[in-house]
Image (cartoon, grey):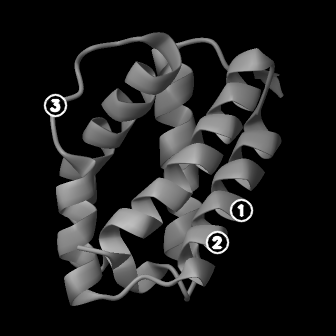
Amino acid sequence: MRVLATGDDVRELVKAFYDRLLADPEMRPFFADLDLPHHLPKIEAFWRGVLFGDRSYTGDPMTAHIALHKRHPMEQRHFDRWLAHWNATLDALFTGTKAQEAKARAASIAPVMMWKVRNS
């Protein structure tokens, strides 16, 4: 393991995380219609912004997730699994304050996302 410290680290984290999600039969259906090569750079940019202040992310994650929820309803267990996969991916690859921050930020994002998608 190494310290999470660069944009390249974020790229590795996001790819490994999505590999975990796609290997999970309960989570895979959420990504059936997703163009992963197009999607991953956006997610990387989002997390670079969250963790390192990078301002290259453009988009509206809430609107995208609300639309996804309408096609494939998300329940608490899905958010719990998302967070568990995120944390497990971080634990397998990285250490340091940014890795801990990534866990904390995801833990704060998940309930807000769940509330918004389920109440839209």
Residue at numbered disc 1 = 84
Residue at numbered disc 2 = 81
Name the N-terminal-most of marks 3 and 2.
Answer: 3
Which percent across, then down, holds residue 116?
A: 34, 64
Q: Residue at 41%, 59% (x, y): give it.
A: 113
Q: Residue at 73%, 50% (x, y): give it.
A: 87
Look at the numbered disc 2 and give the secondary structure of its residue. Answer: helix
Residue at numbered disc 3 = 58
Which percent across, then down, holds residue 23?
A: 57, 75
Contact between labelled residues 1 and 2, with CB atoms less than 8 Å apart? yes
Q: CA distance from mark 2 to mark 1?
A: 5 Å
Q: CA distance from mark 3 to mark 1?
A: 26 Å
The kind of residue on which mark 2 rests is Arg
Q: Quadrant of residue 48?
A: top left
Above or below for 43 versus 97: below
Q: Residue at 54%, 35% (x, y): give it.
A: 12
The kind of residue on which mark 3 rests is Thr
Q: Which disc is residue 41 wearing?
A: none
Residue 62 visible, this angle: yes
Look at the numbered disc 3 and give the secondary structure of its residue. Answer: loop
